[in-house]
Image (cartoon, rainbow, N blue to C red):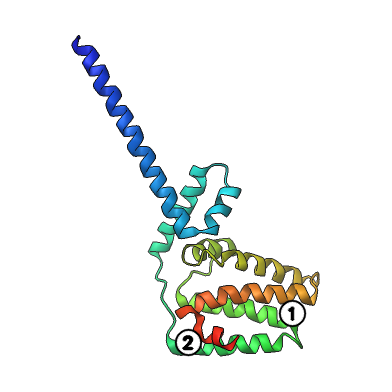
Amino acid sequence: MDTWVWIAIVVLVIAVIAAIVWEMAARRKTAALQEQFGPEYERAMRVSESRRDAENELSARRERRATLDIRPLSASARDRYADAWREVQASFVDEPTASLVEANRLVLIVMRERGYPMDDFEQRVADISVDHPNVVDHYRAANAISADAADDRMTTEDMRQGLVHYRALFTDLLGEDGEQLRQAR
């Protein structure tokens, strides 16, 4: 065979190997993002125009998170916040709207103390989704309920659901599995 035929065969083989390696790397990236983000990965897929866009968005979140100084709460801070949460829940019966507002405030305080930036809501959601992907939808739901409660468009049951959503995130944010809060329940 001529030299040019051998060159064409080698180039073709290299191209096939490169395509296989690229596909394997893409699958590994997808699997890693799915494992890290869990349900948030599926949500990103639903709202994005393509898998590539969704995965790039999640990767950008992870890269931003790596630059943040997120720290755990001290044991005394966890105890103090767990006590504050119990007070929020206890006040719900008499003042459901105020209790919901206080739950939101308490979540924001804990986020700030842990080191999460307090940019706009969507940025907080993106930052939280990296470390707490299983409860970030609770935060979205609680925020929506809180906004509607402020406009007097929510029933007491809706506000109770909002409090439940805040509690899911709050417990996760406490760290150490939110042990004191779980024991209280």
| Residue denoted by label 2 | 77
Residue 97 has which mark?
1
* Residue 145, position as x, y percentages in the image: 71, 69
Instruction: Give the residue displayed 66% in from the left and 75% down from the top.
Output: 164
* Residue 21, position as x, y percentages in the image: 33, 38
For the N terminus, the quadrant is top left
Left or right: residue 56 versus residue 15 is right
Point out the tag, 1 or 2, that comes first from the N-terminus: 2
Q: Between marks 1 and 2, how big is the CA–CA gap? A: 25 Å
The picture quadrant where one finds residue 143 is bottom right
Closer to the camera in the image, 176 or 52: 176
Q: Which structural element holds mark 2?
A: helix
Closer to the camera in the image, 121 or 74: 74
Residue 134 has which mark?
none
Single out the residue that lies furthest toward the top.
2
Amino acid at circle 1: Thr
* Residue 161, position as x, y percentages in the image: 70, 73
**Do we see residue 138 in this rendering?**
yes
Instruction: Give the residue displayed 68% in from the left and 89% down from the top.
Output: 90
For label 1, the crowd category at 10 Å Cα-Cα, with few meaning under 14, some 14 to 19 and many 20 or more, is: many
Q: Which structural element holds mark 1?
A: helix
For the C terminus, the quadrant is bottom right
As drawn, 33 above or below 109: above
Left or right: residue 124 versus residue 6 is right
